[in-house]
Image (cartoon, grey):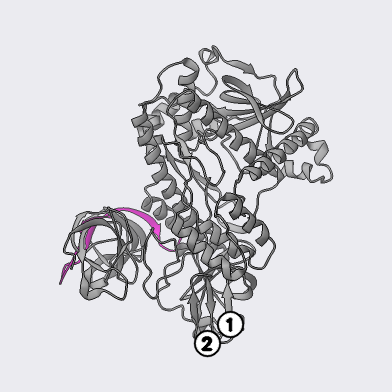
């Protein structure tokens, strides 16, 4: 019997049991509810094997010591019980209720609040306790739910006073001394293309011909690094935040508004500092020459995706609206189409993607939403930004300069084998499992009933993109050398890359590799937190909108499959749960390899992408919760009174799934 002690991170579930990811790697260990040793989700622990809890091949253990707590605060709803105030954690994986001992006096029962943990509690009679830190307002409101989510993910809504003071001291026009040595592009046809509601403009584009008739693509990026200097309060806060967080009609910016929407933003008709990447392309769309330069630009116009798409799709009246830009836009689309074709030829992946666009009224309440895929002008900007990112990364690498790369590793062999196993029964051959083989599978599945499932399975097989000073390439883009250069207003890694470009132009040493690596690690961590917060907040907005549609019937498609039911997506992008108890009576079994829920009867078979009609049974915006039932089912017969199961999410690598564990649902990837 192995009697060694191991260390790792404990991952709790709302069912009491959990898993530990060992520091030395390998598969996760299953920890029964009675063996958690008082560990909370995210704690670092010491654990040992526990033979009596073994079930078949599943490796079980017990926690013997908590060495570091993963969280010092928790959010939830306050309740008064027997003259005492208690916090009911919003995260079902956390123990509760938590006794409130003291702290802020502005909170009241029924509020959503944050509390700093004083004691974690464990064993007979030991109750967790905490001091109140902040009240977010009444728990039933959308505002309190959003504020709590931001707090949970350590995303501050306000800036420290020292940072605000420095932002207010920043000039709101370009200082004359900043123009020295810059290439003047203020008379060139340079413009931005963004969404209708965008307020911060990182990038502008231009397209001209050189003396030899070759196309010269210019990608002009806001020179944030001129205003945000290393070691300054602005820089320290930007590093701590790592990224801006966008949701519905709001943004929590990485930089204060005077910079993000003001002097750093490439607003039309005003002088702005930029770093420009010029790429000369031959008739095949290959970059034959490139140059980086400090520039000053004056955006000729602020174009929108909607307006550009109308022009490119030939809508009536669009030509008159964009008379000056129309010829350039059409040539840009031709070039973007050529660049996209070249990426396909080298093995880049083209996964289907869409996002939910939420429309809010003047009070910030969601009133409509729709799934939106990329249009033709979005494709132009995507291709141009990808090419600029590659060109800058290659320039720094050739010069032997350290760089913060955007890295995407090849899929794990075990994940590829699982994908192969899932595809074979569907008649798809994964072949070598490289980018070309994966894309052939995606192309063949496009437009087929199983298409959404295939897209999801391929996406689940991919590793997560990250930032690193090691150039390990980008598998999804089939790029040997890639970085993020094009969004320094909202992403800290781009700001680090800009500083390295300045050092290259000045022939100076630049930022040390160790400092870049620290920035890369922090940026990766903050990106993950921001993405998680955005998903949770989006659910709250969508559920709030659906509160006015309870009882209505909608067509839906299966977007996730679990043992406890189906996750369904409506045509407008709203997602919710249809519990297995609401399905036609049958004995259901989950086939994980094909993500299919099957009953004994042949007609009762549900897989990703399957179409059915559902009725909205319940919607709670403050909880981000939408529940479905089948049309005609009575509310009193539905299983919504008991606690809602946690939404399925990807398991950490190597985690084994005990009976009843949810199956991961679809996640959108990021380049």
Secondary structure type for disc 2: loop
User: Is residue 64 placed above or below 473 in the rendered structure?
Assistant: below
Q: Residue at x 38, y 35 (%)?
A: 519
Give the Cα separation between the discs numbered 2 and 1.
Answer: 8 Å
User: Is residue 504 placed above or below 407 in the rendered structure?
Assistant: above
Instruction: Between residue 647 and residue 500, name the one nearer to us.
Output: 500
Residue 39 in the magenta stretch? The answer is no
Q: Position of residue 397 (x, y in %)?
A: 48, 28
Q: Which residue is disc 2 drawn over?
A: 586
To which quarter of the image does residue 513 belong? top left
Q: Which residue is disc 1 drawn over?
A: 604
Horizontal side, residue 95 vs residue 312: left or right:
left
Q: Position of residue 100 (x, y in %)?
A: 24, 61
Horizontal side, residue 267 vs residue 651: left or right:
right
Mark 1 nearby-residue class (10 Å; few <14, some 14–19, many ≥20): some
The span picked out in magenta is: 116-142
Residue situated furthest right in the rendering = 316
Q: Position of residue 467 (x, y in %)?
A: 43, 40
Give the mark nearest the N terminus, 2 or 1. Answer: 2
User: Is residue 636 placed above or below 304 in the rendered structure?
Assistant: below
Residue 118 in the magenta stretch? The answer is yes
Mark 2 nearby-residue class (10 Å; few <14, some 14–19, many ≥20): few
Residue 370 appears anywhere in the view? no
Which mark, by number, is residue 345? Answer: none
Is label 2 in contact with label 1 (beta carbons under 8 Å)?
yes
Q: Position of residue 474 (x, y in %)?
A: 51, 42
To which quarter of the image does residue 165 belong? top left
Secondary structure type for disc 1: loop
Residue 348 appears anywhere in the view? yes
Q: Residue at x 48, y 33 (%)?
A: 494
Horizontal side, residue 295 vs residue 85: left or right:
right
């Amino acid at each position: 019997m192995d009697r060694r002690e191991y260390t790792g991170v404990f991952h709790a579930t709302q069912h009491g049991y959990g898993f530990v990811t060992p520091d030395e790697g390998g598969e996760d260990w299953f920890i029964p509810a009675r063996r958690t040793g008082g560990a909370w989700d995210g704690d670092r622990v010491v654990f040992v094997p526990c033979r009596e809890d073994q079930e078949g091949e599943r490796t079980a253990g017990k926690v013997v010591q908590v060495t570091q707590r993963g969280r010092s605060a928790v959010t939830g709803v306050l309740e008064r019980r027997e003259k005492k105030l208690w916090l009911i954690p919003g995260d079902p994986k956390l123990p509760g209720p938590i006794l409130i001992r003291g702290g802020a006096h502005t909170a009241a029962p029924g509020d959503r609040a944050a509390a700093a943990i004083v004691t974690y509690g464990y064993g007979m009679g030991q109750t967790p306790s905490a001091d109140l830190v902040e009240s977010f307002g009444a728990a039933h409101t959308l505002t309190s739910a959003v504020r709590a989510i931001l707090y949970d993910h350590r995303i501050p809504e306000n800036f420290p006073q020292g940072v605000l003071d420095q932002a207010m001291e920043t000039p709101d026009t370009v200082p004359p001394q900043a123009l020295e040595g810059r290439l003047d592009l203020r008379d060139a046809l340079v413009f931005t293309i963004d969404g209708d509601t965008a307020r911060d403009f990182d990038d502008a584009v231009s397209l001209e011909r050189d003396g030899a008739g070759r196309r010269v693509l210019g990608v002009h990026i806001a020179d944030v690094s001129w205003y945000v200097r290393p070691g300054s309060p602005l820089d320290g806060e930007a590093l701590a935040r790592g990224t801006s967080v966008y949701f519905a009609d709001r943004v929590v910016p990485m930089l204060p508004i005077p910079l993000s929407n003001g002097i750093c933003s490439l607003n039309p008709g005003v002088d702005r500092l930029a770093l420009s990447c010029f790429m000369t392309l031959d008739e095949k769309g290959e970059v034959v020459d490139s140059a980086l330069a400090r520039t000053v630009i004056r955006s000729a116009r602020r174009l929108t995706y909607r307006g550009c798409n109308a022009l490119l799709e030939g809508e009536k009246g669009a030509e008159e609206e964009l008379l000056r830009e129309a010829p350039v836009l059409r040539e840009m689309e031709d070039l973007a189409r050529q660049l996209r074709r070249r990426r396909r030829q080298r093995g880049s992946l083209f996964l289907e993607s869409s996002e939910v666009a939420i429309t809010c009224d003047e009070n910030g309440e969601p009133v409509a939403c729709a799934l939106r895929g990329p249009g033709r002008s979005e494709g132009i900007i995507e291709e141009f930004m990808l090419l600029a990112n590659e060109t800058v990364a290659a320039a720094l690498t050739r010069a032997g300069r350290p760089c913060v790369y955007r890295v995407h590793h090849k899929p794990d062999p075990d994940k590829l084998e699982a994908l192969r196993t899932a595809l074979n029964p569907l008649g798809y051959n994964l072949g070598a499992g490289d980018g070309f083989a994966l894309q052939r599978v995606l192309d063949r599945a496009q437009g087929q009933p199983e298409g959404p499932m295939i897209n999801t399975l391929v996406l689940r097989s991919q590793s997560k993109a990250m930032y690193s000073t090691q150039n390990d390439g980008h598998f999804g883009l089939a790029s040997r050398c890639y970085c993020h250069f094009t969004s320094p207003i909202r992403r800290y890694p781009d700001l680090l890359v800009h500083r390295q470009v300045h050092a290259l132009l000045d022939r100076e040493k630049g930022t040390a590799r160790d400092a870049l690596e620290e920035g890369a690690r922090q940026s990766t961590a903050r990106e993950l937190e921001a993405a998680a917060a955005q998903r949770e907040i989006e659910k709250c907005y969508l559920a709030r909108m659906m509160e006015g549609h309870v009882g209505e019937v909608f067509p839906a498609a299966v977007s996730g499959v679990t043992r406890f039911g189906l996750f369904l997506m409506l045509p407008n992008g709203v997602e919710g749960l249809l519990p297995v108890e609401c399905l036609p009576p049958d004995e259901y079994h989950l086939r994980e390899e094909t993500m299919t829920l099957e009953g004994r009867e042949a007609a009762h078979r549900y897989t990703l992408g399957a179409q059915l009609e559902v009725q909205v049974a319940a919607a709670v915006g403050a909880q981000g919760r939408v529940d479905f039932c089948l049309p005609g089912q009575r509310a009193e017969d539905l299983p919504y009174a008991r606690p809602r199961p946690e939404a399925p999410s990807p398991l950490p690598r190597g985690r084994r799934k005990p009976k009843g564990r949810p199956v991961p649902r679809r996640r959108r990837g990021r380049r």
